[in-house]
Image (spheres, helix red, strand yellow):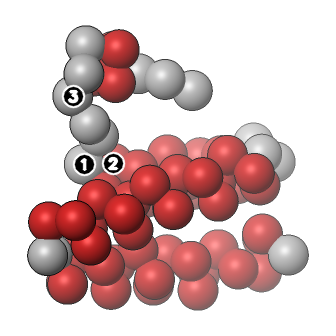
Amino acid sequence: MPALRSFVGLRESPRNLIGLAVLAVTDGDREAARQLLDEAAELAADSGAQGVGRWVEGARDELRVALS
């Protein structure tokens, strides 16, 4: 699911990745959702954005039922 931003070397924002993960779960693509949330968590950690990291973990918690 590479977007134009990724193609030209720009990374998605963690917030956008969370939204894409929700869409992936809706489409039944659990693996894509996991990968998107992992990428969002990595971006948040790399930038020291602890609040955003909590958003990612909150999204994981909310989607956990759908991901299991």
Figure quadrant of residue 7: top left
Asked whether 52 or 26 is in front, the reply is 52
Q: Is residue 63 left or right of residue 42?
A: right
Mark 3: which amino acid?
Leu
The residue that label 1 is drawn on is 13
Q: Is residue 51 left or right of residue 63?
A: left
Q: For the residues carrying marks 3 and 1, which lies nearer the camera in this image?
A: 3
Badge 2 marks a residue whose secondary structure is helix
Q: Report whether residue 52 is seen.
A: yes
Q: For the residues carrying marks 2 and 3, which lies nearer the camera in this image?
A: 3
Mark 1: which amino acid?
Ser
Q: CA distance from mark 2 to mark 1?
A: 5 Å
The residue that label 2 is drawn on is 16
Mark 2: which amino acid?
Asn
**At which x and y percent is residue 54?**
33, 86
Q: For the residues carrying marks 2 and 1, which lies nearer the camera in this image?
A: 1
Asked if marks 2 and 3 touch (Cβ < 8 Å), the reply is no
Asked whether 56 or 48 is in front, the reply is 48
Count of picture labels:
3
Sooner in the amino-acid sequence: mark 2 or mark 3: 3
Q: Residue at x 14, y 76 (%)?
A: 48
Q: CA distance from mark 2 to mark 3?
A: 13 Å
| Quadrant of the frame with the N terminus | top right
The residue that label 3 is drawn on is 10
Asked if marks 2 and 1 touch (Cβ < 8 Å), the reply is yes
Figure quadrant of residue 10: top left
**At which x and y percent is residue 36?**
52, 51
Dot 2, how many residues are within 10 Å of its Cα: few (below 14), some (14-19), or many (20+)?
Answer: few
